[in-house]
């Protein structure tokens, strides 16, 4: 008897994340049920509960894992692990149910944009582009103007990472050719774990005061909301660049906006506390900020990678083998995250 798979990826759409070939691979590996873009009604979930072994979901809204006596794995395709107020992780551990996150599919794409934003801000590419289009003279041989500090390269610079998970590791690989001196603040990792990646472990104040480029990469949690408050933001060196890449949750955004308006440092931002950002938000007018509309991972190539990774692990699980593509969510990290 083939394993029963509940394919319920809403809010994602099948065509967005799955190629025809990857859908065919999943269908060949197991007995696919539902398989529509709309969220499966509870009546459908109830009817399948006794038989389903794998659940592929955009968000967890399926009740207690105890509801599914044969369940072996939950595979999320939304981009982050279900929060503990939605999914009972203790029950998953007790039952041996793996919770798998598609985050590794997004890591390289997000890291690449993070590197691009850092370079754009350090080299003042956005400001130069706007000036060029507006007829403001900024030719290097005649009228070399800059905006809040001098342009700089990444070569040999001190780079600080707030959070050192999969995204940071993907970014570390991209930074290697630049010979950057890497340091990180991550209270969820030991010093030895950071040293294994040739990254120095530092406290947050040291990181902010000594890094020329600062990447905000941490997973949002109950303990790190507005972690970067005004006092900490004011520790950032005037010639530094702050790249906000994971979530605005980690920053006091009003204080950040005021610091940038005062010209304290430069920034590149992909995530915001309110999306879409209001048209009249003052950060839109600041010349020392490079703005991106939450597009780091929102691209077809990365989304199709989600489908490919899911198909790879579904094939393994249905063959009685361990998953190898997706991230196994660690209960210890979920406990550290807390409710948010």
Image (cartoon, grey):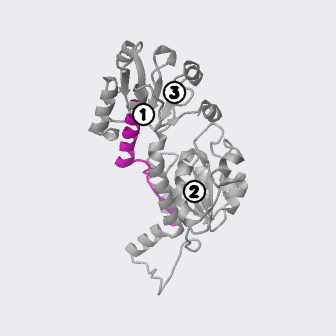
Q: Is 230 in the magenta?
A: no
Q: Is residue 247 above or below residue 82?
A: below
Q: Is residue 207 above or below residue 49?
A: below
Which comes before the other along the chain, label 1 or label 3? Answer: 3
Which mark, by number, is residue 99? none
Outermost residue toward the bottom in this view? 142
Q: Which residues are magenta?
A: 287-314
Say which quadrant the C terminus sits in.
top right
Label 2 Cα crowd, 10 Å radius (few <14 / some 14-19 / many 20+): some
**Under tag 1, what secondary structure?**
helix
Label 3 Cα crowd, 10 Å radius (few <14 / some 14-19 / many 20+): many
Q: Answer yes or no: is residue 267 visible.
A: no
Which mark, by number, is residue 313? 1
Identify residue for label 2: 257
Q: Position of residue 124 (x, y in %)?
A: 50, 70
Residue at x-position 51% and y-position 34%: 81
């Amino acid at each position: 008897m083939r394993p029963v798979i509940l394919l319920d990826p809403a809010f994602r759409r099948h065509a967005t994340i799955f190629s025809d070939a990857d859908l065919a691979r999943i269908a060949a590996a197991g007995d696919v049920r539902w398989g529509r873009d709309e969220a499966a009604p509870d009546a459908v979930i109830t009817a399948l509960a006794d038989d389903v072994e794998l659940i592929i979901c955009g968000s967890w809204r399926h009740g207690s894992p105890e509801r599914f006596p044969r369940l072996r794995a939950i595979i999320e395709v939304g981009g982050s692990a279900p929060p503990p107020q939605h999914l009972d992780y203790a029950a998953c551990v007790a039952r041996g149910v793996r919770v798998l996150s598609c985050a590794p599919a997004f890591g390289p794409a997000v890291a690449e944009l993070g590197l691009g934003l850092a370079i754009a801000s350090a080299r003042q590419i956005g400001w130069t582009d706007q000036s060029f289009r507006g007829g403001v003279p900024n030719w290097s041989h005649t009228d070399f103007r800059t905006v809040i500090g001098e342009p700089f390269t990444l070569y040999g610079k001190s780079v600080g990472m707030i959070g050192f998970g999969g995204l940071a590791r993907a970014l570390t690989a991209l930074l290697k050719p630049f010979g950057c001196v890497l340091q990180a603040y991550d209270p969820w990792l030991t010093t030895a774990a950071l040293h294994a990646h040739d990254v120095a472990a530092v406290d947050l104040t040291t990181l902010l005061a000594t890094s020329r480029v600062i990447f905000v990469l941490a997973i949002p949690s109950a303990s790190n909301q507005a972690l970067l408050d005004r006092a900490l933001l004011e520790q950032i060196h005037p010639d530094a660049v702050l790249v906000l890449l994971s979530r605005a949750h980690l920053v006091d955004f009003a204080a950040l906006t005021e610091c940038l308006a005062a010209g304290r440092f430069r920034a590149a931002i992909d995530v915001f506390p309110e999306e879409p950002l209001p048209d009249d938000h003052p950060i839109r007018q600041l010349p020392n900020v490079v703005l991106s509309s939450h597009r780091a991972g929102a691209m077809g190539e990365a989304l199709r990678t989600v489908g490919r990774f899911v198909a790879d692990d579904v094939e393994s699980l249905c063959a009685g083998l361990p998953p190898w593509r997706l991230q196994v969510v660690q209960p210890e990290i979920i406990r550290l995250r807390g409710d948010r």
